[in-house]
Amino acid sequence: MEKNQQLVLGLRQADQWLEVSEASILSIQQILELGSTLGVPVDIELLDPLLELLGSLQSQLKQSTETVDGIRERAANITQGDSREERIKQAIQMTLRVLVTLGELDSHMKETVNRLSELQTKVQHKKDEVHRWIVMTTIGALLIITWMGAGQVFLCRHGWEIFHRYRSTT
C-alpha cells in the first residue's frame, strides 16, 4: 500500500508540473503575441501543438491516477470470500492496466520533452533576434540624439558669434 501511495503522490506531482509547464507556455505565448504587435516577425501558433500535447498528457495522467486509485480501492475491497486465484487475477489485470497507461504516458512525456527542447531553441533564437533589434534601435536613437545635440551646439555657437559681431559693431 505504501508503494501505491508513493505512485499516487508521484502522479499528482507530475500533474502539478504539467500545470506549471502549461502556465509557462501560456506566458511565453503572450510574450510572442506582444512581440508580434511590436512588429517582430514571430510565429504565434508555434506553441499551439505543445499546448494540445500538454492537455493530452494531463488527461492521460488523470486517467492513470484514477486507475491507481481504483486499484487501491479494489485491493481494499477484496473480500475474504474471493478465492486466492480470483484475487491474483484481479491484481494482474489492474497491474497490466497501470503498466499500459504509464507506458503511454511515458512516451507522451518523452515527446513533450523533445518539443520543449525544440521550443527552447526557437525561443532562444527569437530572444537573440529581439536583443539585436533592441541594440540597433538604441544605437539609432543615440545617433539621432547626438545629431540633434550637435545641431543645438552649432546653433548656439552661431548665435554667440552673431551676438559678438553685433556687440563689436555697436
Image (cartoon, rainbow, N blue to C red):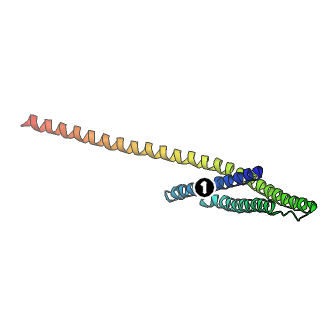
Give me the residue at 64% from left, 61% from top.
Answer: 48
Give me the residue at 60% from left, 46% from top.
Answer: 124
Q: Nearer the viewer, residue 101 or 7?
A: 7
Left or right, 61 with reference to 129: right
Q: Nearer the viewer, residue 103 or 116?
A: 103
Circle 1 residues within 10 Å: few <14, some 14–19, many ≥20: some
Residue 62 screen position, x and y as percent: 71, 61
The relative height of residue 62 versus residue 3 in the rendered view (above or below) is: below
Left or right, 18 with reference to 88: left
The residue that mark 1 highlights is 25
Q: Nearer the viewer, residue 46 or 70?
A: 70
Question: In terms of image quadrants, where is residue 72?
Answer: bottom right
Q: Nearer the viewer, residue 1 or 37?
A: 1
Q: How many labels sit on residues? A: 1
Left or right, 29 with reference to 99: left
Furthest-top residue in this view: 168
